[in-house]
Image: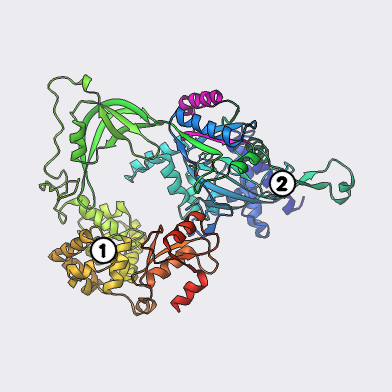
Amino acid sequence: MSAKEQIEALRKELHQHNYNYYVLNQPTISDYEFDQKMHELEELEQQHPEYADPNSPTQRVGSDLNQSFKQVPHKYPMLSLANTYNEGEVRDFYERIRSGLEGEDFDIVAEMKYDGLSISLTYVDGKLTQAVTRGDGVVGDDVTANVRTIRSIPLQLKEGSGYPHEFEIRGEILMPWTSFEALNAEREAKEEPLFANPRNAASGTLKSQKSELVAARKLDAYLYYLIVPENASVQQPSLGGMADLFGGVEEQPFSNDYHYEGLMQAKQWGFKISEGMKKCKTIDEILDFINYWDKERKNLPVATDGIVLKVNSLRQQRHLGYTAKSPRWAIAYKFKAERECTRLNEVTYQVGRTGAITPVANMDPVQLAGTIVKRASLHNADIIEELDLYVGDMVYVEKGGEIIPKVVGVDKSQRVPGMQKVAFITTCPECGAPLVRYEGEAAHYCPNDSGCPPQIKGRIEHYISRKAMNIDSLGPETVDDFYQRGLIHDIADLYTLTVAQVAGYNKNRVVSATKAVQAIQDSVNVPFERVVFAIGIRFVGETTAKLLARKFKSMDALRQASLEQLLDVDGVGQVIAESVIRYFADAKNNDIIDRLAAAGVQMRMSDEELADHTDKLAGQSIVISGVFERHSRDEYKAMIEKHGGKNVGSISAKTSFVLAGDNMGPAKLEKAQKLGVKIVKEDDFLQMLT
Ligand code: IVH
């Protein structure tokens, strides 16, 4: 056998073992044997780089290269489903289908609604070529490199299994409960923030810039929607006859007429298909399915939040059609949030970066929607008052699909005499300062911003974060360490750090310390608008920081701006303007700014940036819609901002114009026409700016 043949044979074999293990859950060889074969393949591939293939099973490990995601338009928009919450609404759906189909016989497919994030996979000639997230339904992120690491997604479909030359298949990427709990346990040990639920964990993982990390996090995927273009063809192994003369295969048209049968075929090609799908004829069969899975879903390895009902025949689906947002031929039934009763032992309080105090209920651990819950946010003093909470109360805890568990009520019948009503604290649990409550705000605050440790550390963490100064060789642990060792008290102190200080007496730390100090020094080149965001003025987010930077152009001008001048900036209201004034009225902040400036941090817009910016679109609100040819959406967004305009999400009477590409959504088009909002084509827009 030649090396090439050997490599191909090993790849094929390993694809099959992956499938047996991750899709069928039925491995036929030991992990050890699998590793041996993988190793063998790796070595061969190393010796023969000319046969490299991104779809090789060895590539599942991912890479630590940074990737930023390309935005790609969906060939077919990714729609969402209308939700129903009770039996009555499900019956209504069934009746709508029945009358819509005018007496024709129909089947409804009932299946699990997976609670992860949706993905669209493209296969060409049996190979995975692209994986795109839902995004806004029209354009999504190309996450192919990350998706390749998910073992249950086939990179190569089974040969001769009859797949069409080209198709898309959509489904849900999920983090199984076991991986989720292991990940959070690991994060807890490292004092890293926990993920609230497997969906957030899966989403955070899939959007990671490093596919190596994605590979380590063990995601899974179920597929539930097959899209085969019309006139698709398939290579079938020939059953003899003329075609044998041409290599033993025959081209045949591929017909995809039914949802259920289509997915059953996809299962043969190698996909992991939604468990427990059922074709139903009557409404009673549908309701039985719902009731069965409402309980049984707790035994599934992944999170589900409902049942999806779909008309089986694709011809009937086309007949029923779509509303602006979702198909008329399908609907989601959402399970009720799970609720448990447990004892409240104590209310503790957390202090955030801004000094905001969050009360937390500490309870007897209770099993809820797949995880063990022992803490829940109580949000603020008003909510505690409304619940009328006593320490020792039996409380009801609920967990919806997305949210952190919350206390929704109290079983007052279980109260015993002598229990204490929960009294909100009056001083900061971290530094002892008396708390304040600003007018119109629900939260209490610790006002000791320059002396309260979590606030000091929080501000430094914000300063180094990715969207601010992006000093990525530091993290929350290093900040905590430097603070504990007395090396830093505020953001300006970062620039005084030396390698000797950071490494301490530890020789082994010199390399990482040098890297950290260098990264801090490099941050002096970060553009001014990000500095405005990084210094952490309350209520000044990324977008507002840009507006302020562009309007005032230097820190000195911003520092001297009056309330009126600030309010004059489009997008800056009373709360933000007052907060900016308050920030610069504080001598400590001015001192920090002066020390940052002395360290070389950018305190004004560079000449280049200034030259790039004009007022051509000043005061205009612009909506972007459709798919573009010359630039990406993000580039257009940046252009609008550079020229003083504002990119807004939805069309209203205040919209100046719509920057429209191809395939602008019909709903948007109608709205624009109704309100008389101008539509500007890509080329004309670029013309406006020249
Ligand atoms: S079908 C045109 N089937 O729910 C129909 N969606 O609200 C396309 N989802 O974005 C979707 N399980 O992320 C379908 N068995 C299932 C599903 C499912 C979960 C998600 C999907 C979609 C959302 C719709």
Residue located beneath label 2 in the image: 9
- Left or right: 214, with 611 as reference point: right
Residue 159 locus on image (x, y percent): 72, 44
Say which element carries label 2.
helix
Residue at 76% x, 53% y is 2
- Taking the image as shown, residue 309 lies to the left or right of residue 344, namely right
Magenta span covers which residues? 283-312
Disc 1 to disc 2, C-alpha distance: 63 Å
Q: Residues within 10 Å of mark 1 (few under 14, many from 20)?
A: some
Q: Which residue is mark 1?
A: 572
Name the disc covering residue 371, or none. none
Looking at the image, can residue 600 be seen?
A: no
Quadrant including the C terminus = bottom left
Query: Residue 437, position in %: x, y?
Result: 14, 48
Q: Position of residue 532 (x, y in %)?
A: 27, 66
Identify residue type, mark 2. Ala
Residue 303 belongs to the span the image colors magenta = yes
